[in-house]
């Protein structure tokens, strides 16, 4: 096995080393126009509120209750029936806020978590004016055309290994349980019909050397984005035109809550199979920074495993590389 950038081949059977490679630019599929940004990516056993046949059902909607405003209250569409259904699904003691606009849902919840977080908090915004993707890239959102929200969770010390991949699996399972069209592109993309549907940004708040809270940011295209040959993007309405931002939130919110509730018991080991079932890169030749090779899958720590042309194995850590398919 080799270190990234080494010219010495290693035995293919050796345990792969974790490597670092230069990151590259991405485009944002959290918005309807596929702008520049990045994110991170996963399945869930929760089926309390989910669409059937890849479309929203009556279970994804119910009687309006406006969320507590952060900047200015959301008038539409997030103050509709779906929010009440979500409140009921999340249960008492869960703080749910819906706003028309704020700078960044992740930044807002990170600041709240620094002040102390006694209970989980979900913040959804129709529009973000300073949204961020992975590596600090811009994250755009458009009212009605996309769903952008963040979930802050008090953390009790469980390992974070593989969490971003599990979140992607939870989203994919909730939105398209059949598993026929929605795939996960390591490390941070949800894809629909080989086009980018959305992504995830996970950030933490530390107290000393201990993780005090985790903030999971999610961006999804709802409407079909404008065509962009350089970065194909898709919206949930490609699956079913009945999808809206509100119904999507009502479906994925409980799935993420179930994931985080069960994480101390299950961890990445409990979600690895679900991710692998939707792995969009397995078997493809890719480039990860300076490395080129064939993707073998993900390992027990959520790293992407590559076999290079010399037979050496490399484990590429999430969040440190840009992966581009070299097929076709």
Image (cartoon, helix red, strand yellow):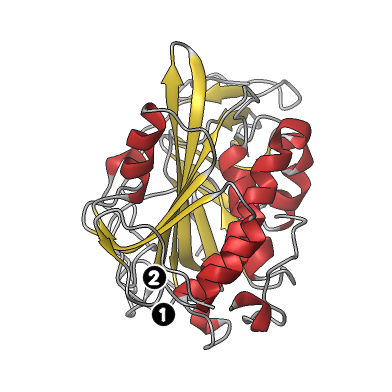
Horizontal arrangement in the rendering, residue 85 relative to residue 135 (left or right): right
- Tag 1 near tag 2, CB within 8 Å: yes
Q: Secondary structure at mark 1?
A: loop
Please give the name of the residue rendered at 66% of the width and 83% of the height, measured from the top-left corner. Answer: 58
Instruction: Please indicate whether residue 287 sits to the left or right of residue 184 in the image.
Output: left
Above or below, 5 against 68 in this view is above
Which residue is painted at 72% across and 79% down in the image? 52
Residue 290 placement (x, y as % from top left)? 41, 34
**Is residue 36 found left or right of 269 in the rendered image?**
left
- Residue 69: image location, x then y, percent: 32, 58
Going 65% across and 24% down the picture, which residue do you hit?
Answer: 16
Q: Quadrant of residue 269?
A: top right
Would you call the spot at circle 2 few (<14 residues within 10 Å), some (14-19), or many (20 or more)? many
Closest to the observer, 202 or 280: 202
- Residue 297 x %, y %: 68, 43
- Residue 287 against residue 15 in the figure, above or below: below
| Foreground of the two, 248 or 297 | 248
Residue under pointer 2: 146
Alpha carbon distance from label 1 to label 2: 7 Å
Disc 1 target residue: 223
Q: Nearer the viewer, residue 263 or 156?
A: 156
């Amino acid at each position: 096995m080799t270190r990234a950038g080494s010219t010495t081949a290693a035995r293919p059977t050796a345990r792969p080393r974790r490597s670092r490679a230069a990151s590259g630019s991405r485009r944002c599929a959290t918005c309807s126009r596929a702008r520049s940004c990045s994110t991170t990516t996963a399945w869930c056993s929760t089926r309390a509120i989910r669409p059937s046949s890849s479309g929203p059902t009556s279970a994804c909607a119910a009687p309006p209750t406006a969320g507590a405003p952060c900047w200015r209250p959301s008038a539409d569409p997030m103050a509709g029936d779906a929010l009440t259904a979500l409140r009921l699904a999340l249960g008492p003691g869960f703080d749910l806020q819906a706003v028309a606009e704020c700078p960044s849902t992740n930044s807002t919840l990170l600041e709240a978590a620094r002040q102390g977080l006694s209970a989980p908090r979900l913040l959804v915004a129709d529009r973000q004016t300073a949204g961020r993707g992975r590596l600090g890239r811009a994250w755009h959102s458009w009212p009605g055309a996309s769903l952008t929200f963040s979930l802050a969770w008090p953390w009790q010390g469980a390992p974070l290994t593989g969490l971003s991949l599990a979140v992607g699996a939870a989203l994919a399972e909730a939105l398209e349980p059949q598993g026929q069209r929605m795939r996960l592109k390591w490390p941070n993309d949800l894809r629909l019909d080989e086009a980018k549907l959305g992504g995830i940004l996970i950030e933490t708040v530390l107290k000393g050397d201990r993780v005090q809270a985790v903030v999971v940011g999610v961006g999804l295209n709802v409407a079909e984005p404008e065509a962009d040959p350089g970065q194909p993007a898709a919206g949930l309405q490609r699956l079913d035109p009945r999808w809206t931002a509100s119904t999507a939130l009502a479906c994925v919110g409980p799935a993420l809550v179930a994931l985080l509730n069960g994480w101390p018991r299950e961890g990445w080991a409990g979600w690895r199979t679900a991710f692998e079932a939707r792995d969009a890169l397995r078997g493809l030749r890719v480039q990860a920074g300076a490395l080129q090779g064939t993707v073998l899958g993900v390992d027990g720590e959520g790293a992407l495993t590559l076999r290079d042309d010399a037979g050496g194995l490399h484990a590429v850590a999430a969040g440190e590389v840009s992966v581009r398919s070299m097929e076709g």
